[in-house]
Image (cartoon, rainbow, N blue to C red):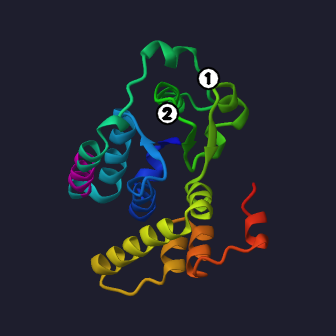
Amino acid sequence: MRALLDACVLYPTVMREMLLGAARAGLYDPLWSARILEEWSRAAAARLGREGEAVAQGEIAVLRARWPDAMVCPDPGLEARLYLPDAADIHVLAAAIAGSADLIVTENRADFPRHILAEEGLGREGADAFLLRLYRKNPQKIAAVGEAVRREAERLSGEKWPMRRLLKKARLPRLGKALEGGGDFSAKNRAGTRR
């Protein structure tokens, strides 16, 4: 499965680390464009200043080296034929099409209507739903990713982070609930994820 990661799921650190950890575990192939990575860098600069931008640039360099085939470069003519409610997001859709993605992972649901994406053979999921789906298929791998991310968060912050609280703060509440439950993902919880 190939998933294009929008900038809004790359900038929050814990969310990004969960998504990239799942990719490192071989659960999907990540995709992005230079413009998406630039948006991540600009968001870091806006929030954290020059130091945040420098950190983001370093992380982006690591991403490019780790996944050299993840970078997609859509043809400018492709963007010209596409429509989305927010024209500023057309480059994301174009990158997904150019990369033969199966879906776009984004938190901006309103900007990527399902019927428009379906016309291009694409789906859309938020990071929580996407990671939860990967967890249902590969609970041990996602649990290992979660534990590694939790340990790193504790190392960097110097404080204890229970899994559920960390992932809830990272806007991954359903995944956090599933992981804190030790892998018990009941039929009731599965039914709650089909939105």
Q: Nearer the viewer, residue 139 or 131?
A: 139
- Could you say which disc has been placed on residue 83 in the image? 1
Q: How many marks?
A: 2
The amino acid type of the residue labelled 1 equals Tyr
The amino acid type of the residue labelled 2 equals Val
* Segment colored magenta: 52-61
In the image, residue 56 lies at what x, y percent? Answer: 27, 52
Residue that carries the numbered disc 2 in the rendered image: 92
In the image, residue 77 lies at what x, y percent? Answer: 47, 12
Is 55 part of what is drawn in magenta?
yes
| Label 2 packing within 10 angstroms: few (<14), some (14-19), many (20+) | many
Q: What residue sits 55% from the left and 65% below the top? A: 171
Q: What residue sits 39% from the left and 87% below the top? A: 160
Q: What residue sits 69% from the left and 31% below the top? A: 118
In the image, residue 47 lies at what x, y percent? Answer: 35, 57
Is 168 part of what is drawn in magenta?
no
Q: Give how far apart the Cα atoms at labels 2 and 1 are.
A: 11 Å
Closer to the chain start, of discs 2 and 1, is 1
Furthest-top residue in this view? 77
Q: What residue sits 21% from the left and 58% below the top? A: 51
Could you tell me which secondary element the residue under label 2 belongs to? helix
Q: Nearer the viewer, residue 144 or 189?
A: 144
Q: Quadrant of the C terminus?
A: bottom right
